[in-house]
Amino acid sequence: MMIKAAFSNAVCEKIGYYVYILKNPISQSIFYVGKGKGNRLFEHLNCALEDFSDSIKYNIIREIITNGFQVEHYILRHGLTEEMALEIESACIDLLGLGNLTNKVVGHNTWERGMKNIDEIIQFYDSRQIIIEEPAIIININRQYKRHMSAEELYNATKHRWKVGVKRNDAKYAIASFNGLVREIYKIESWNKWEDGRYEFFGKIADDDIRDKYINQSLELYIKKGSQNPIKYCGLF
């Protein structure tokens, strides 16, 4: 069995916060990015030798050891403040792609300062506040939203399934909202009630004249920061 790895106290005191990667010597691929201080980067290895839960990360580590290799640990930057480490960790996760790593979550401030294409930069900094003129229901899909979602994935995340009142029947449109921006607008055709009392709507992407008015614009007038309610009615109710 591999001996547990650890830095000496002297090293721990001097390196401060750092950003590190774990690399698979068999596939030559990076499978984890993290930040920490002290012996944080070795905790994954030590836990994998003690915790036999079905974790993708731990399974990779155990596979490496079983095949007679060692996990390759690299420290990318050290002597950092915690805030600097969080930012560098986030940038590395953006660059490598969460789908290529065993990290479970995206990095720190990914939406605010994370990697964006040109269109996303324009949306983020050049959006304008809008007033919704048509009867609509705004649906906050922050928890379901993923970058580069397909049109079908975005529709499914928006339509299914919500606690809504009778006012739903007066809504002509459903607006998919992520981080206070309009991501898509659907013309509602019908509602379906589930056994648990929640509803989902069925519909199609709104006509171009409606989308051109609202798509990628700010819903700041309707969505308050910290609000826990994912549903907001607006327009001519």
Image: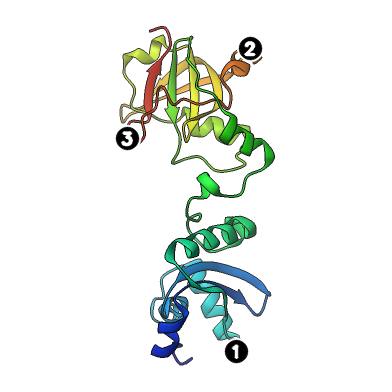
Q: CA distance from mark 2 to mark 3?
A: 31 Å
The residue beneath circle 3 is 228
Residue drawn where x is 42% and y is 7% of the image: 236
Nearest the eye: 18 or 237: 18
Three-letter amino acid code of the residue under disc 3: Gln
Q: Residues within 10 Å of mark 2 (few under 14, many from 20)?
A: few
The residue beneath circle 1 is 68
Above or below, 58 against 142 in this view is below
| Residue 122 occupies quadrant | top right
Look at discs 1 and 2 and give the one toward the viewer.
2
- N-terminal of the pair, mark 1 or mark 2, is 1
The residue beneath circle 2 is 209
Q: CA distance from mark 1 to mark 3?
A: 50 Å
Q: Residues within 10 Å of mark 3 (few under 14, many from 20)?
A: few
Residue 162 in picture, x, y percent from top left: 37, 29
| Residue 204 occupies quadrant | top right
Residue drawn where x is 40% and y is 15% of the image: 234
Q: CA distance from mark 1 to mark 2?
A: 63 Å
Three-letter amino acid code of the residue under disc 2: Asp
Tell how many labels. 3
Residue 223 in picture, x, y percent from top left: 39, 27
Residue 186 in picture, x, y percent from top left: 54, 20
Three-letter amino acid code of the residue under disc 1: Gly
Residue drawn where x is 62% and y is 32% of the image: 151
Label pair 1/3, CB-CB below 8 angstroms: no
